[in-house]
Every structure is written in C-alpha cells, then in structure tokens.
Image (cartoon, rainbow, N blue to C red):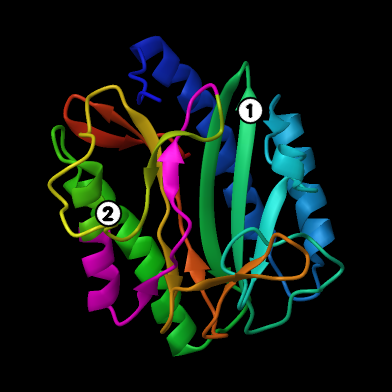
Amino acid sequence: MAITIKKPQEIEKLFVANNIVAKTLDYLASNIHPGLSLKELNSMGESYIQSLGARPAFKGLYGFPAGVCTSVNEVIIHGIPTEYKLQVGDIIGLDIGTEIGGWYGDSAITLGVGEISKDDEALIACAKDALYFAIDIIEPEMRFKELAYEIEKFIIARGFVPLRGFCGHGIGRKPHEEPEIPNYLEGSNPKNGPKIKNGMVFCIEPMICHKDGTPRILDDKWSVVSVDGQRGSHYEHTVAIIDGKAQILSRV
C-alpha cells in the first residue's frame, strides 16, 4: 500500500482532529491527581472529546473498550482503564485518538503523579526528548529507516532501549496508515525503503524501556509491558511535512 500525500486542505482537516487531541491531553493532564481512578479519567477524556464535536476514535477500534489508553507504571502502551486509583509516585501514559469529519488525530504523553523518582523523570524525558529530536531532524528525501535508526541511537545514548514490535504510523482517513515507523532500525541498512515527502502525515511515538525492549502482553489482551518488568514511557505527536519541515499538528 502506498504512502498517501495529503493536500493542504486535507492537512487542515487533520489539524482540526489533532488539535482536539492536544486540548484533551492538556485537560486531562491538568486534572491528574492522587485518588483519581483510570475509569474516571477515561470518562473525562471521552466527554471532553465529544464536547469539542469529535468522536473518541480508540473506543471500539480493533475491540479496544475505551476512548483513552491509560498506561500506568510498568504498562508502556494500550493500558485499559480500570478502577485503579492513581497514587503519588505513579507514572501514567495517556494515548488519545479522535475522529471528526472522517479524519483522525493521535497523540500521547506520559506524566508523573505528584513527586516521582529521578529515574522516572529520566525515563519520561527520554521519550519526550526522543520525539522532539526526531521531529527536528526530519527532512524530505530522508528514509523512514534512517529516522528510525536515529531515534534508536538517541534512546540508547540516554541509557534506555526502545520497545520492539510496536511503531509509529501514517494517519489520515484511517487511524493507522502506511508507513510503519519503528523506533529502531529493522535490518542492517538504513539507506533503503520509502522516503519522506512533502505532504506526508504520520505519527512518531517513542516507547521506552529500561533494559529489554521485548514486549509482553498482559492477560487483558491489551496492556503491553517489557519482559524486564520495569516501568516504561511513551510520547507521540502527529506531524505533517510542509515546506520541507515536520510541523506538529497535535499541539494546542
């Protein structure tokens, strides 16, 4: 399947969907506090998305039961909202998708609940900094594999490793389109595969583990952890390539 090139008016529609994601993440981040349950958090997110005229795109997607992925501590991605109540020292990843007018948005952040450890601060910073590093170095004619390789090197230089088996992706009329964008080099040659072009829109999402990037899926069939059993972090933005630069769409 070919990687689609979006027209300016299509990118504008994607901006609308992603702006709603960004506003929702800001809203939830400002309301995180000890004692808040994951189900309450999800309900707040779903209601806020709907109040802005969009649909929570993750709810029902591939069978996922909620509009907000709530990934706590060792869960890196795809955490299902439960009755668990946040505690001081927890870290939580929030991953949100929206759909409005047939176009999709997608973004994620990881936050601390109250005071967190220096180790968790470094873990979260790695995911966030890797994301913005990747956005800064993108340019047309760069290969997606080159981008993946640079992200991997950045993560390893920080003393962490990328989660394997999961990746960033194209986005548009569907929540997941071509290409797949891992946070590590697949194969041995970054100088092959498709190139980044003006008009492409895709999600970059570093997913960070401590020692071992091998994933394990929990019994709920969704929550992804590392086999090293340690905490993970996740950050994501949707970007559009406009005039040779990656422009962040999922920003307020």
Stretch in magenta: 150-173
Looking at the rendering, which quadrant does residue 150 occupy?
Answer: bottom left
- Bin the neighbour count of mark 2 within 10 Å (Cα to Cα): few under 14, some 14-19, many 20 and up: many
Q: Earlier in the sequence, mark 2 or mark 1?
A: 1
Q: Residues within 10 Å of mark 1 (few under 14, many from 20)?
A: many
Which residue lies at the image location 40% right of the left edge and 20% below the top edge?
11
Task: Determine which residue is flagged by label 1.
Answer: 99
Count of numbered circles on the image? 2
Provide the residue designation for mark 2: 148
Q: Nearer the viewer, residue 30 or 228?
A: 228
Amino acid of disc 2: Ala
| Rendering coords of residue 39 (x, y %) | 83, 59
Q: Is residue 239 magenta?
A: no
State the residue at coordinates (44%, 79%): 121
Q: Amino acid at mark 1?
A: Glu
The local secondary structure at tag 1 comes to: strand
Q: Quadrant of the N terminus?
A: top left
- Between residue 242 and residue 174, name the one nearer to us: 174
Q: Secondary structure at mark 2?
A: helix
The tag on residue 127 is none
Expressed as whole percent of the image width and height from the top left, the position of residue 224 reads 61, 66
Q: Quadrant of residue 194?
A: top left
Q: Is residue 154 magenta?
A: yes
> Residue 46, image x and y in percent?
76, 42
Q: Viewer-nearest of labels 2 and 1?
A: 2
Q: Residue at x 63, y 22 (%)?
A: 100
Q: Is residue 236 left or right of residue 81?
A: left
- Image coordinates of residue 149 in percent, x first then y, are 22, 58
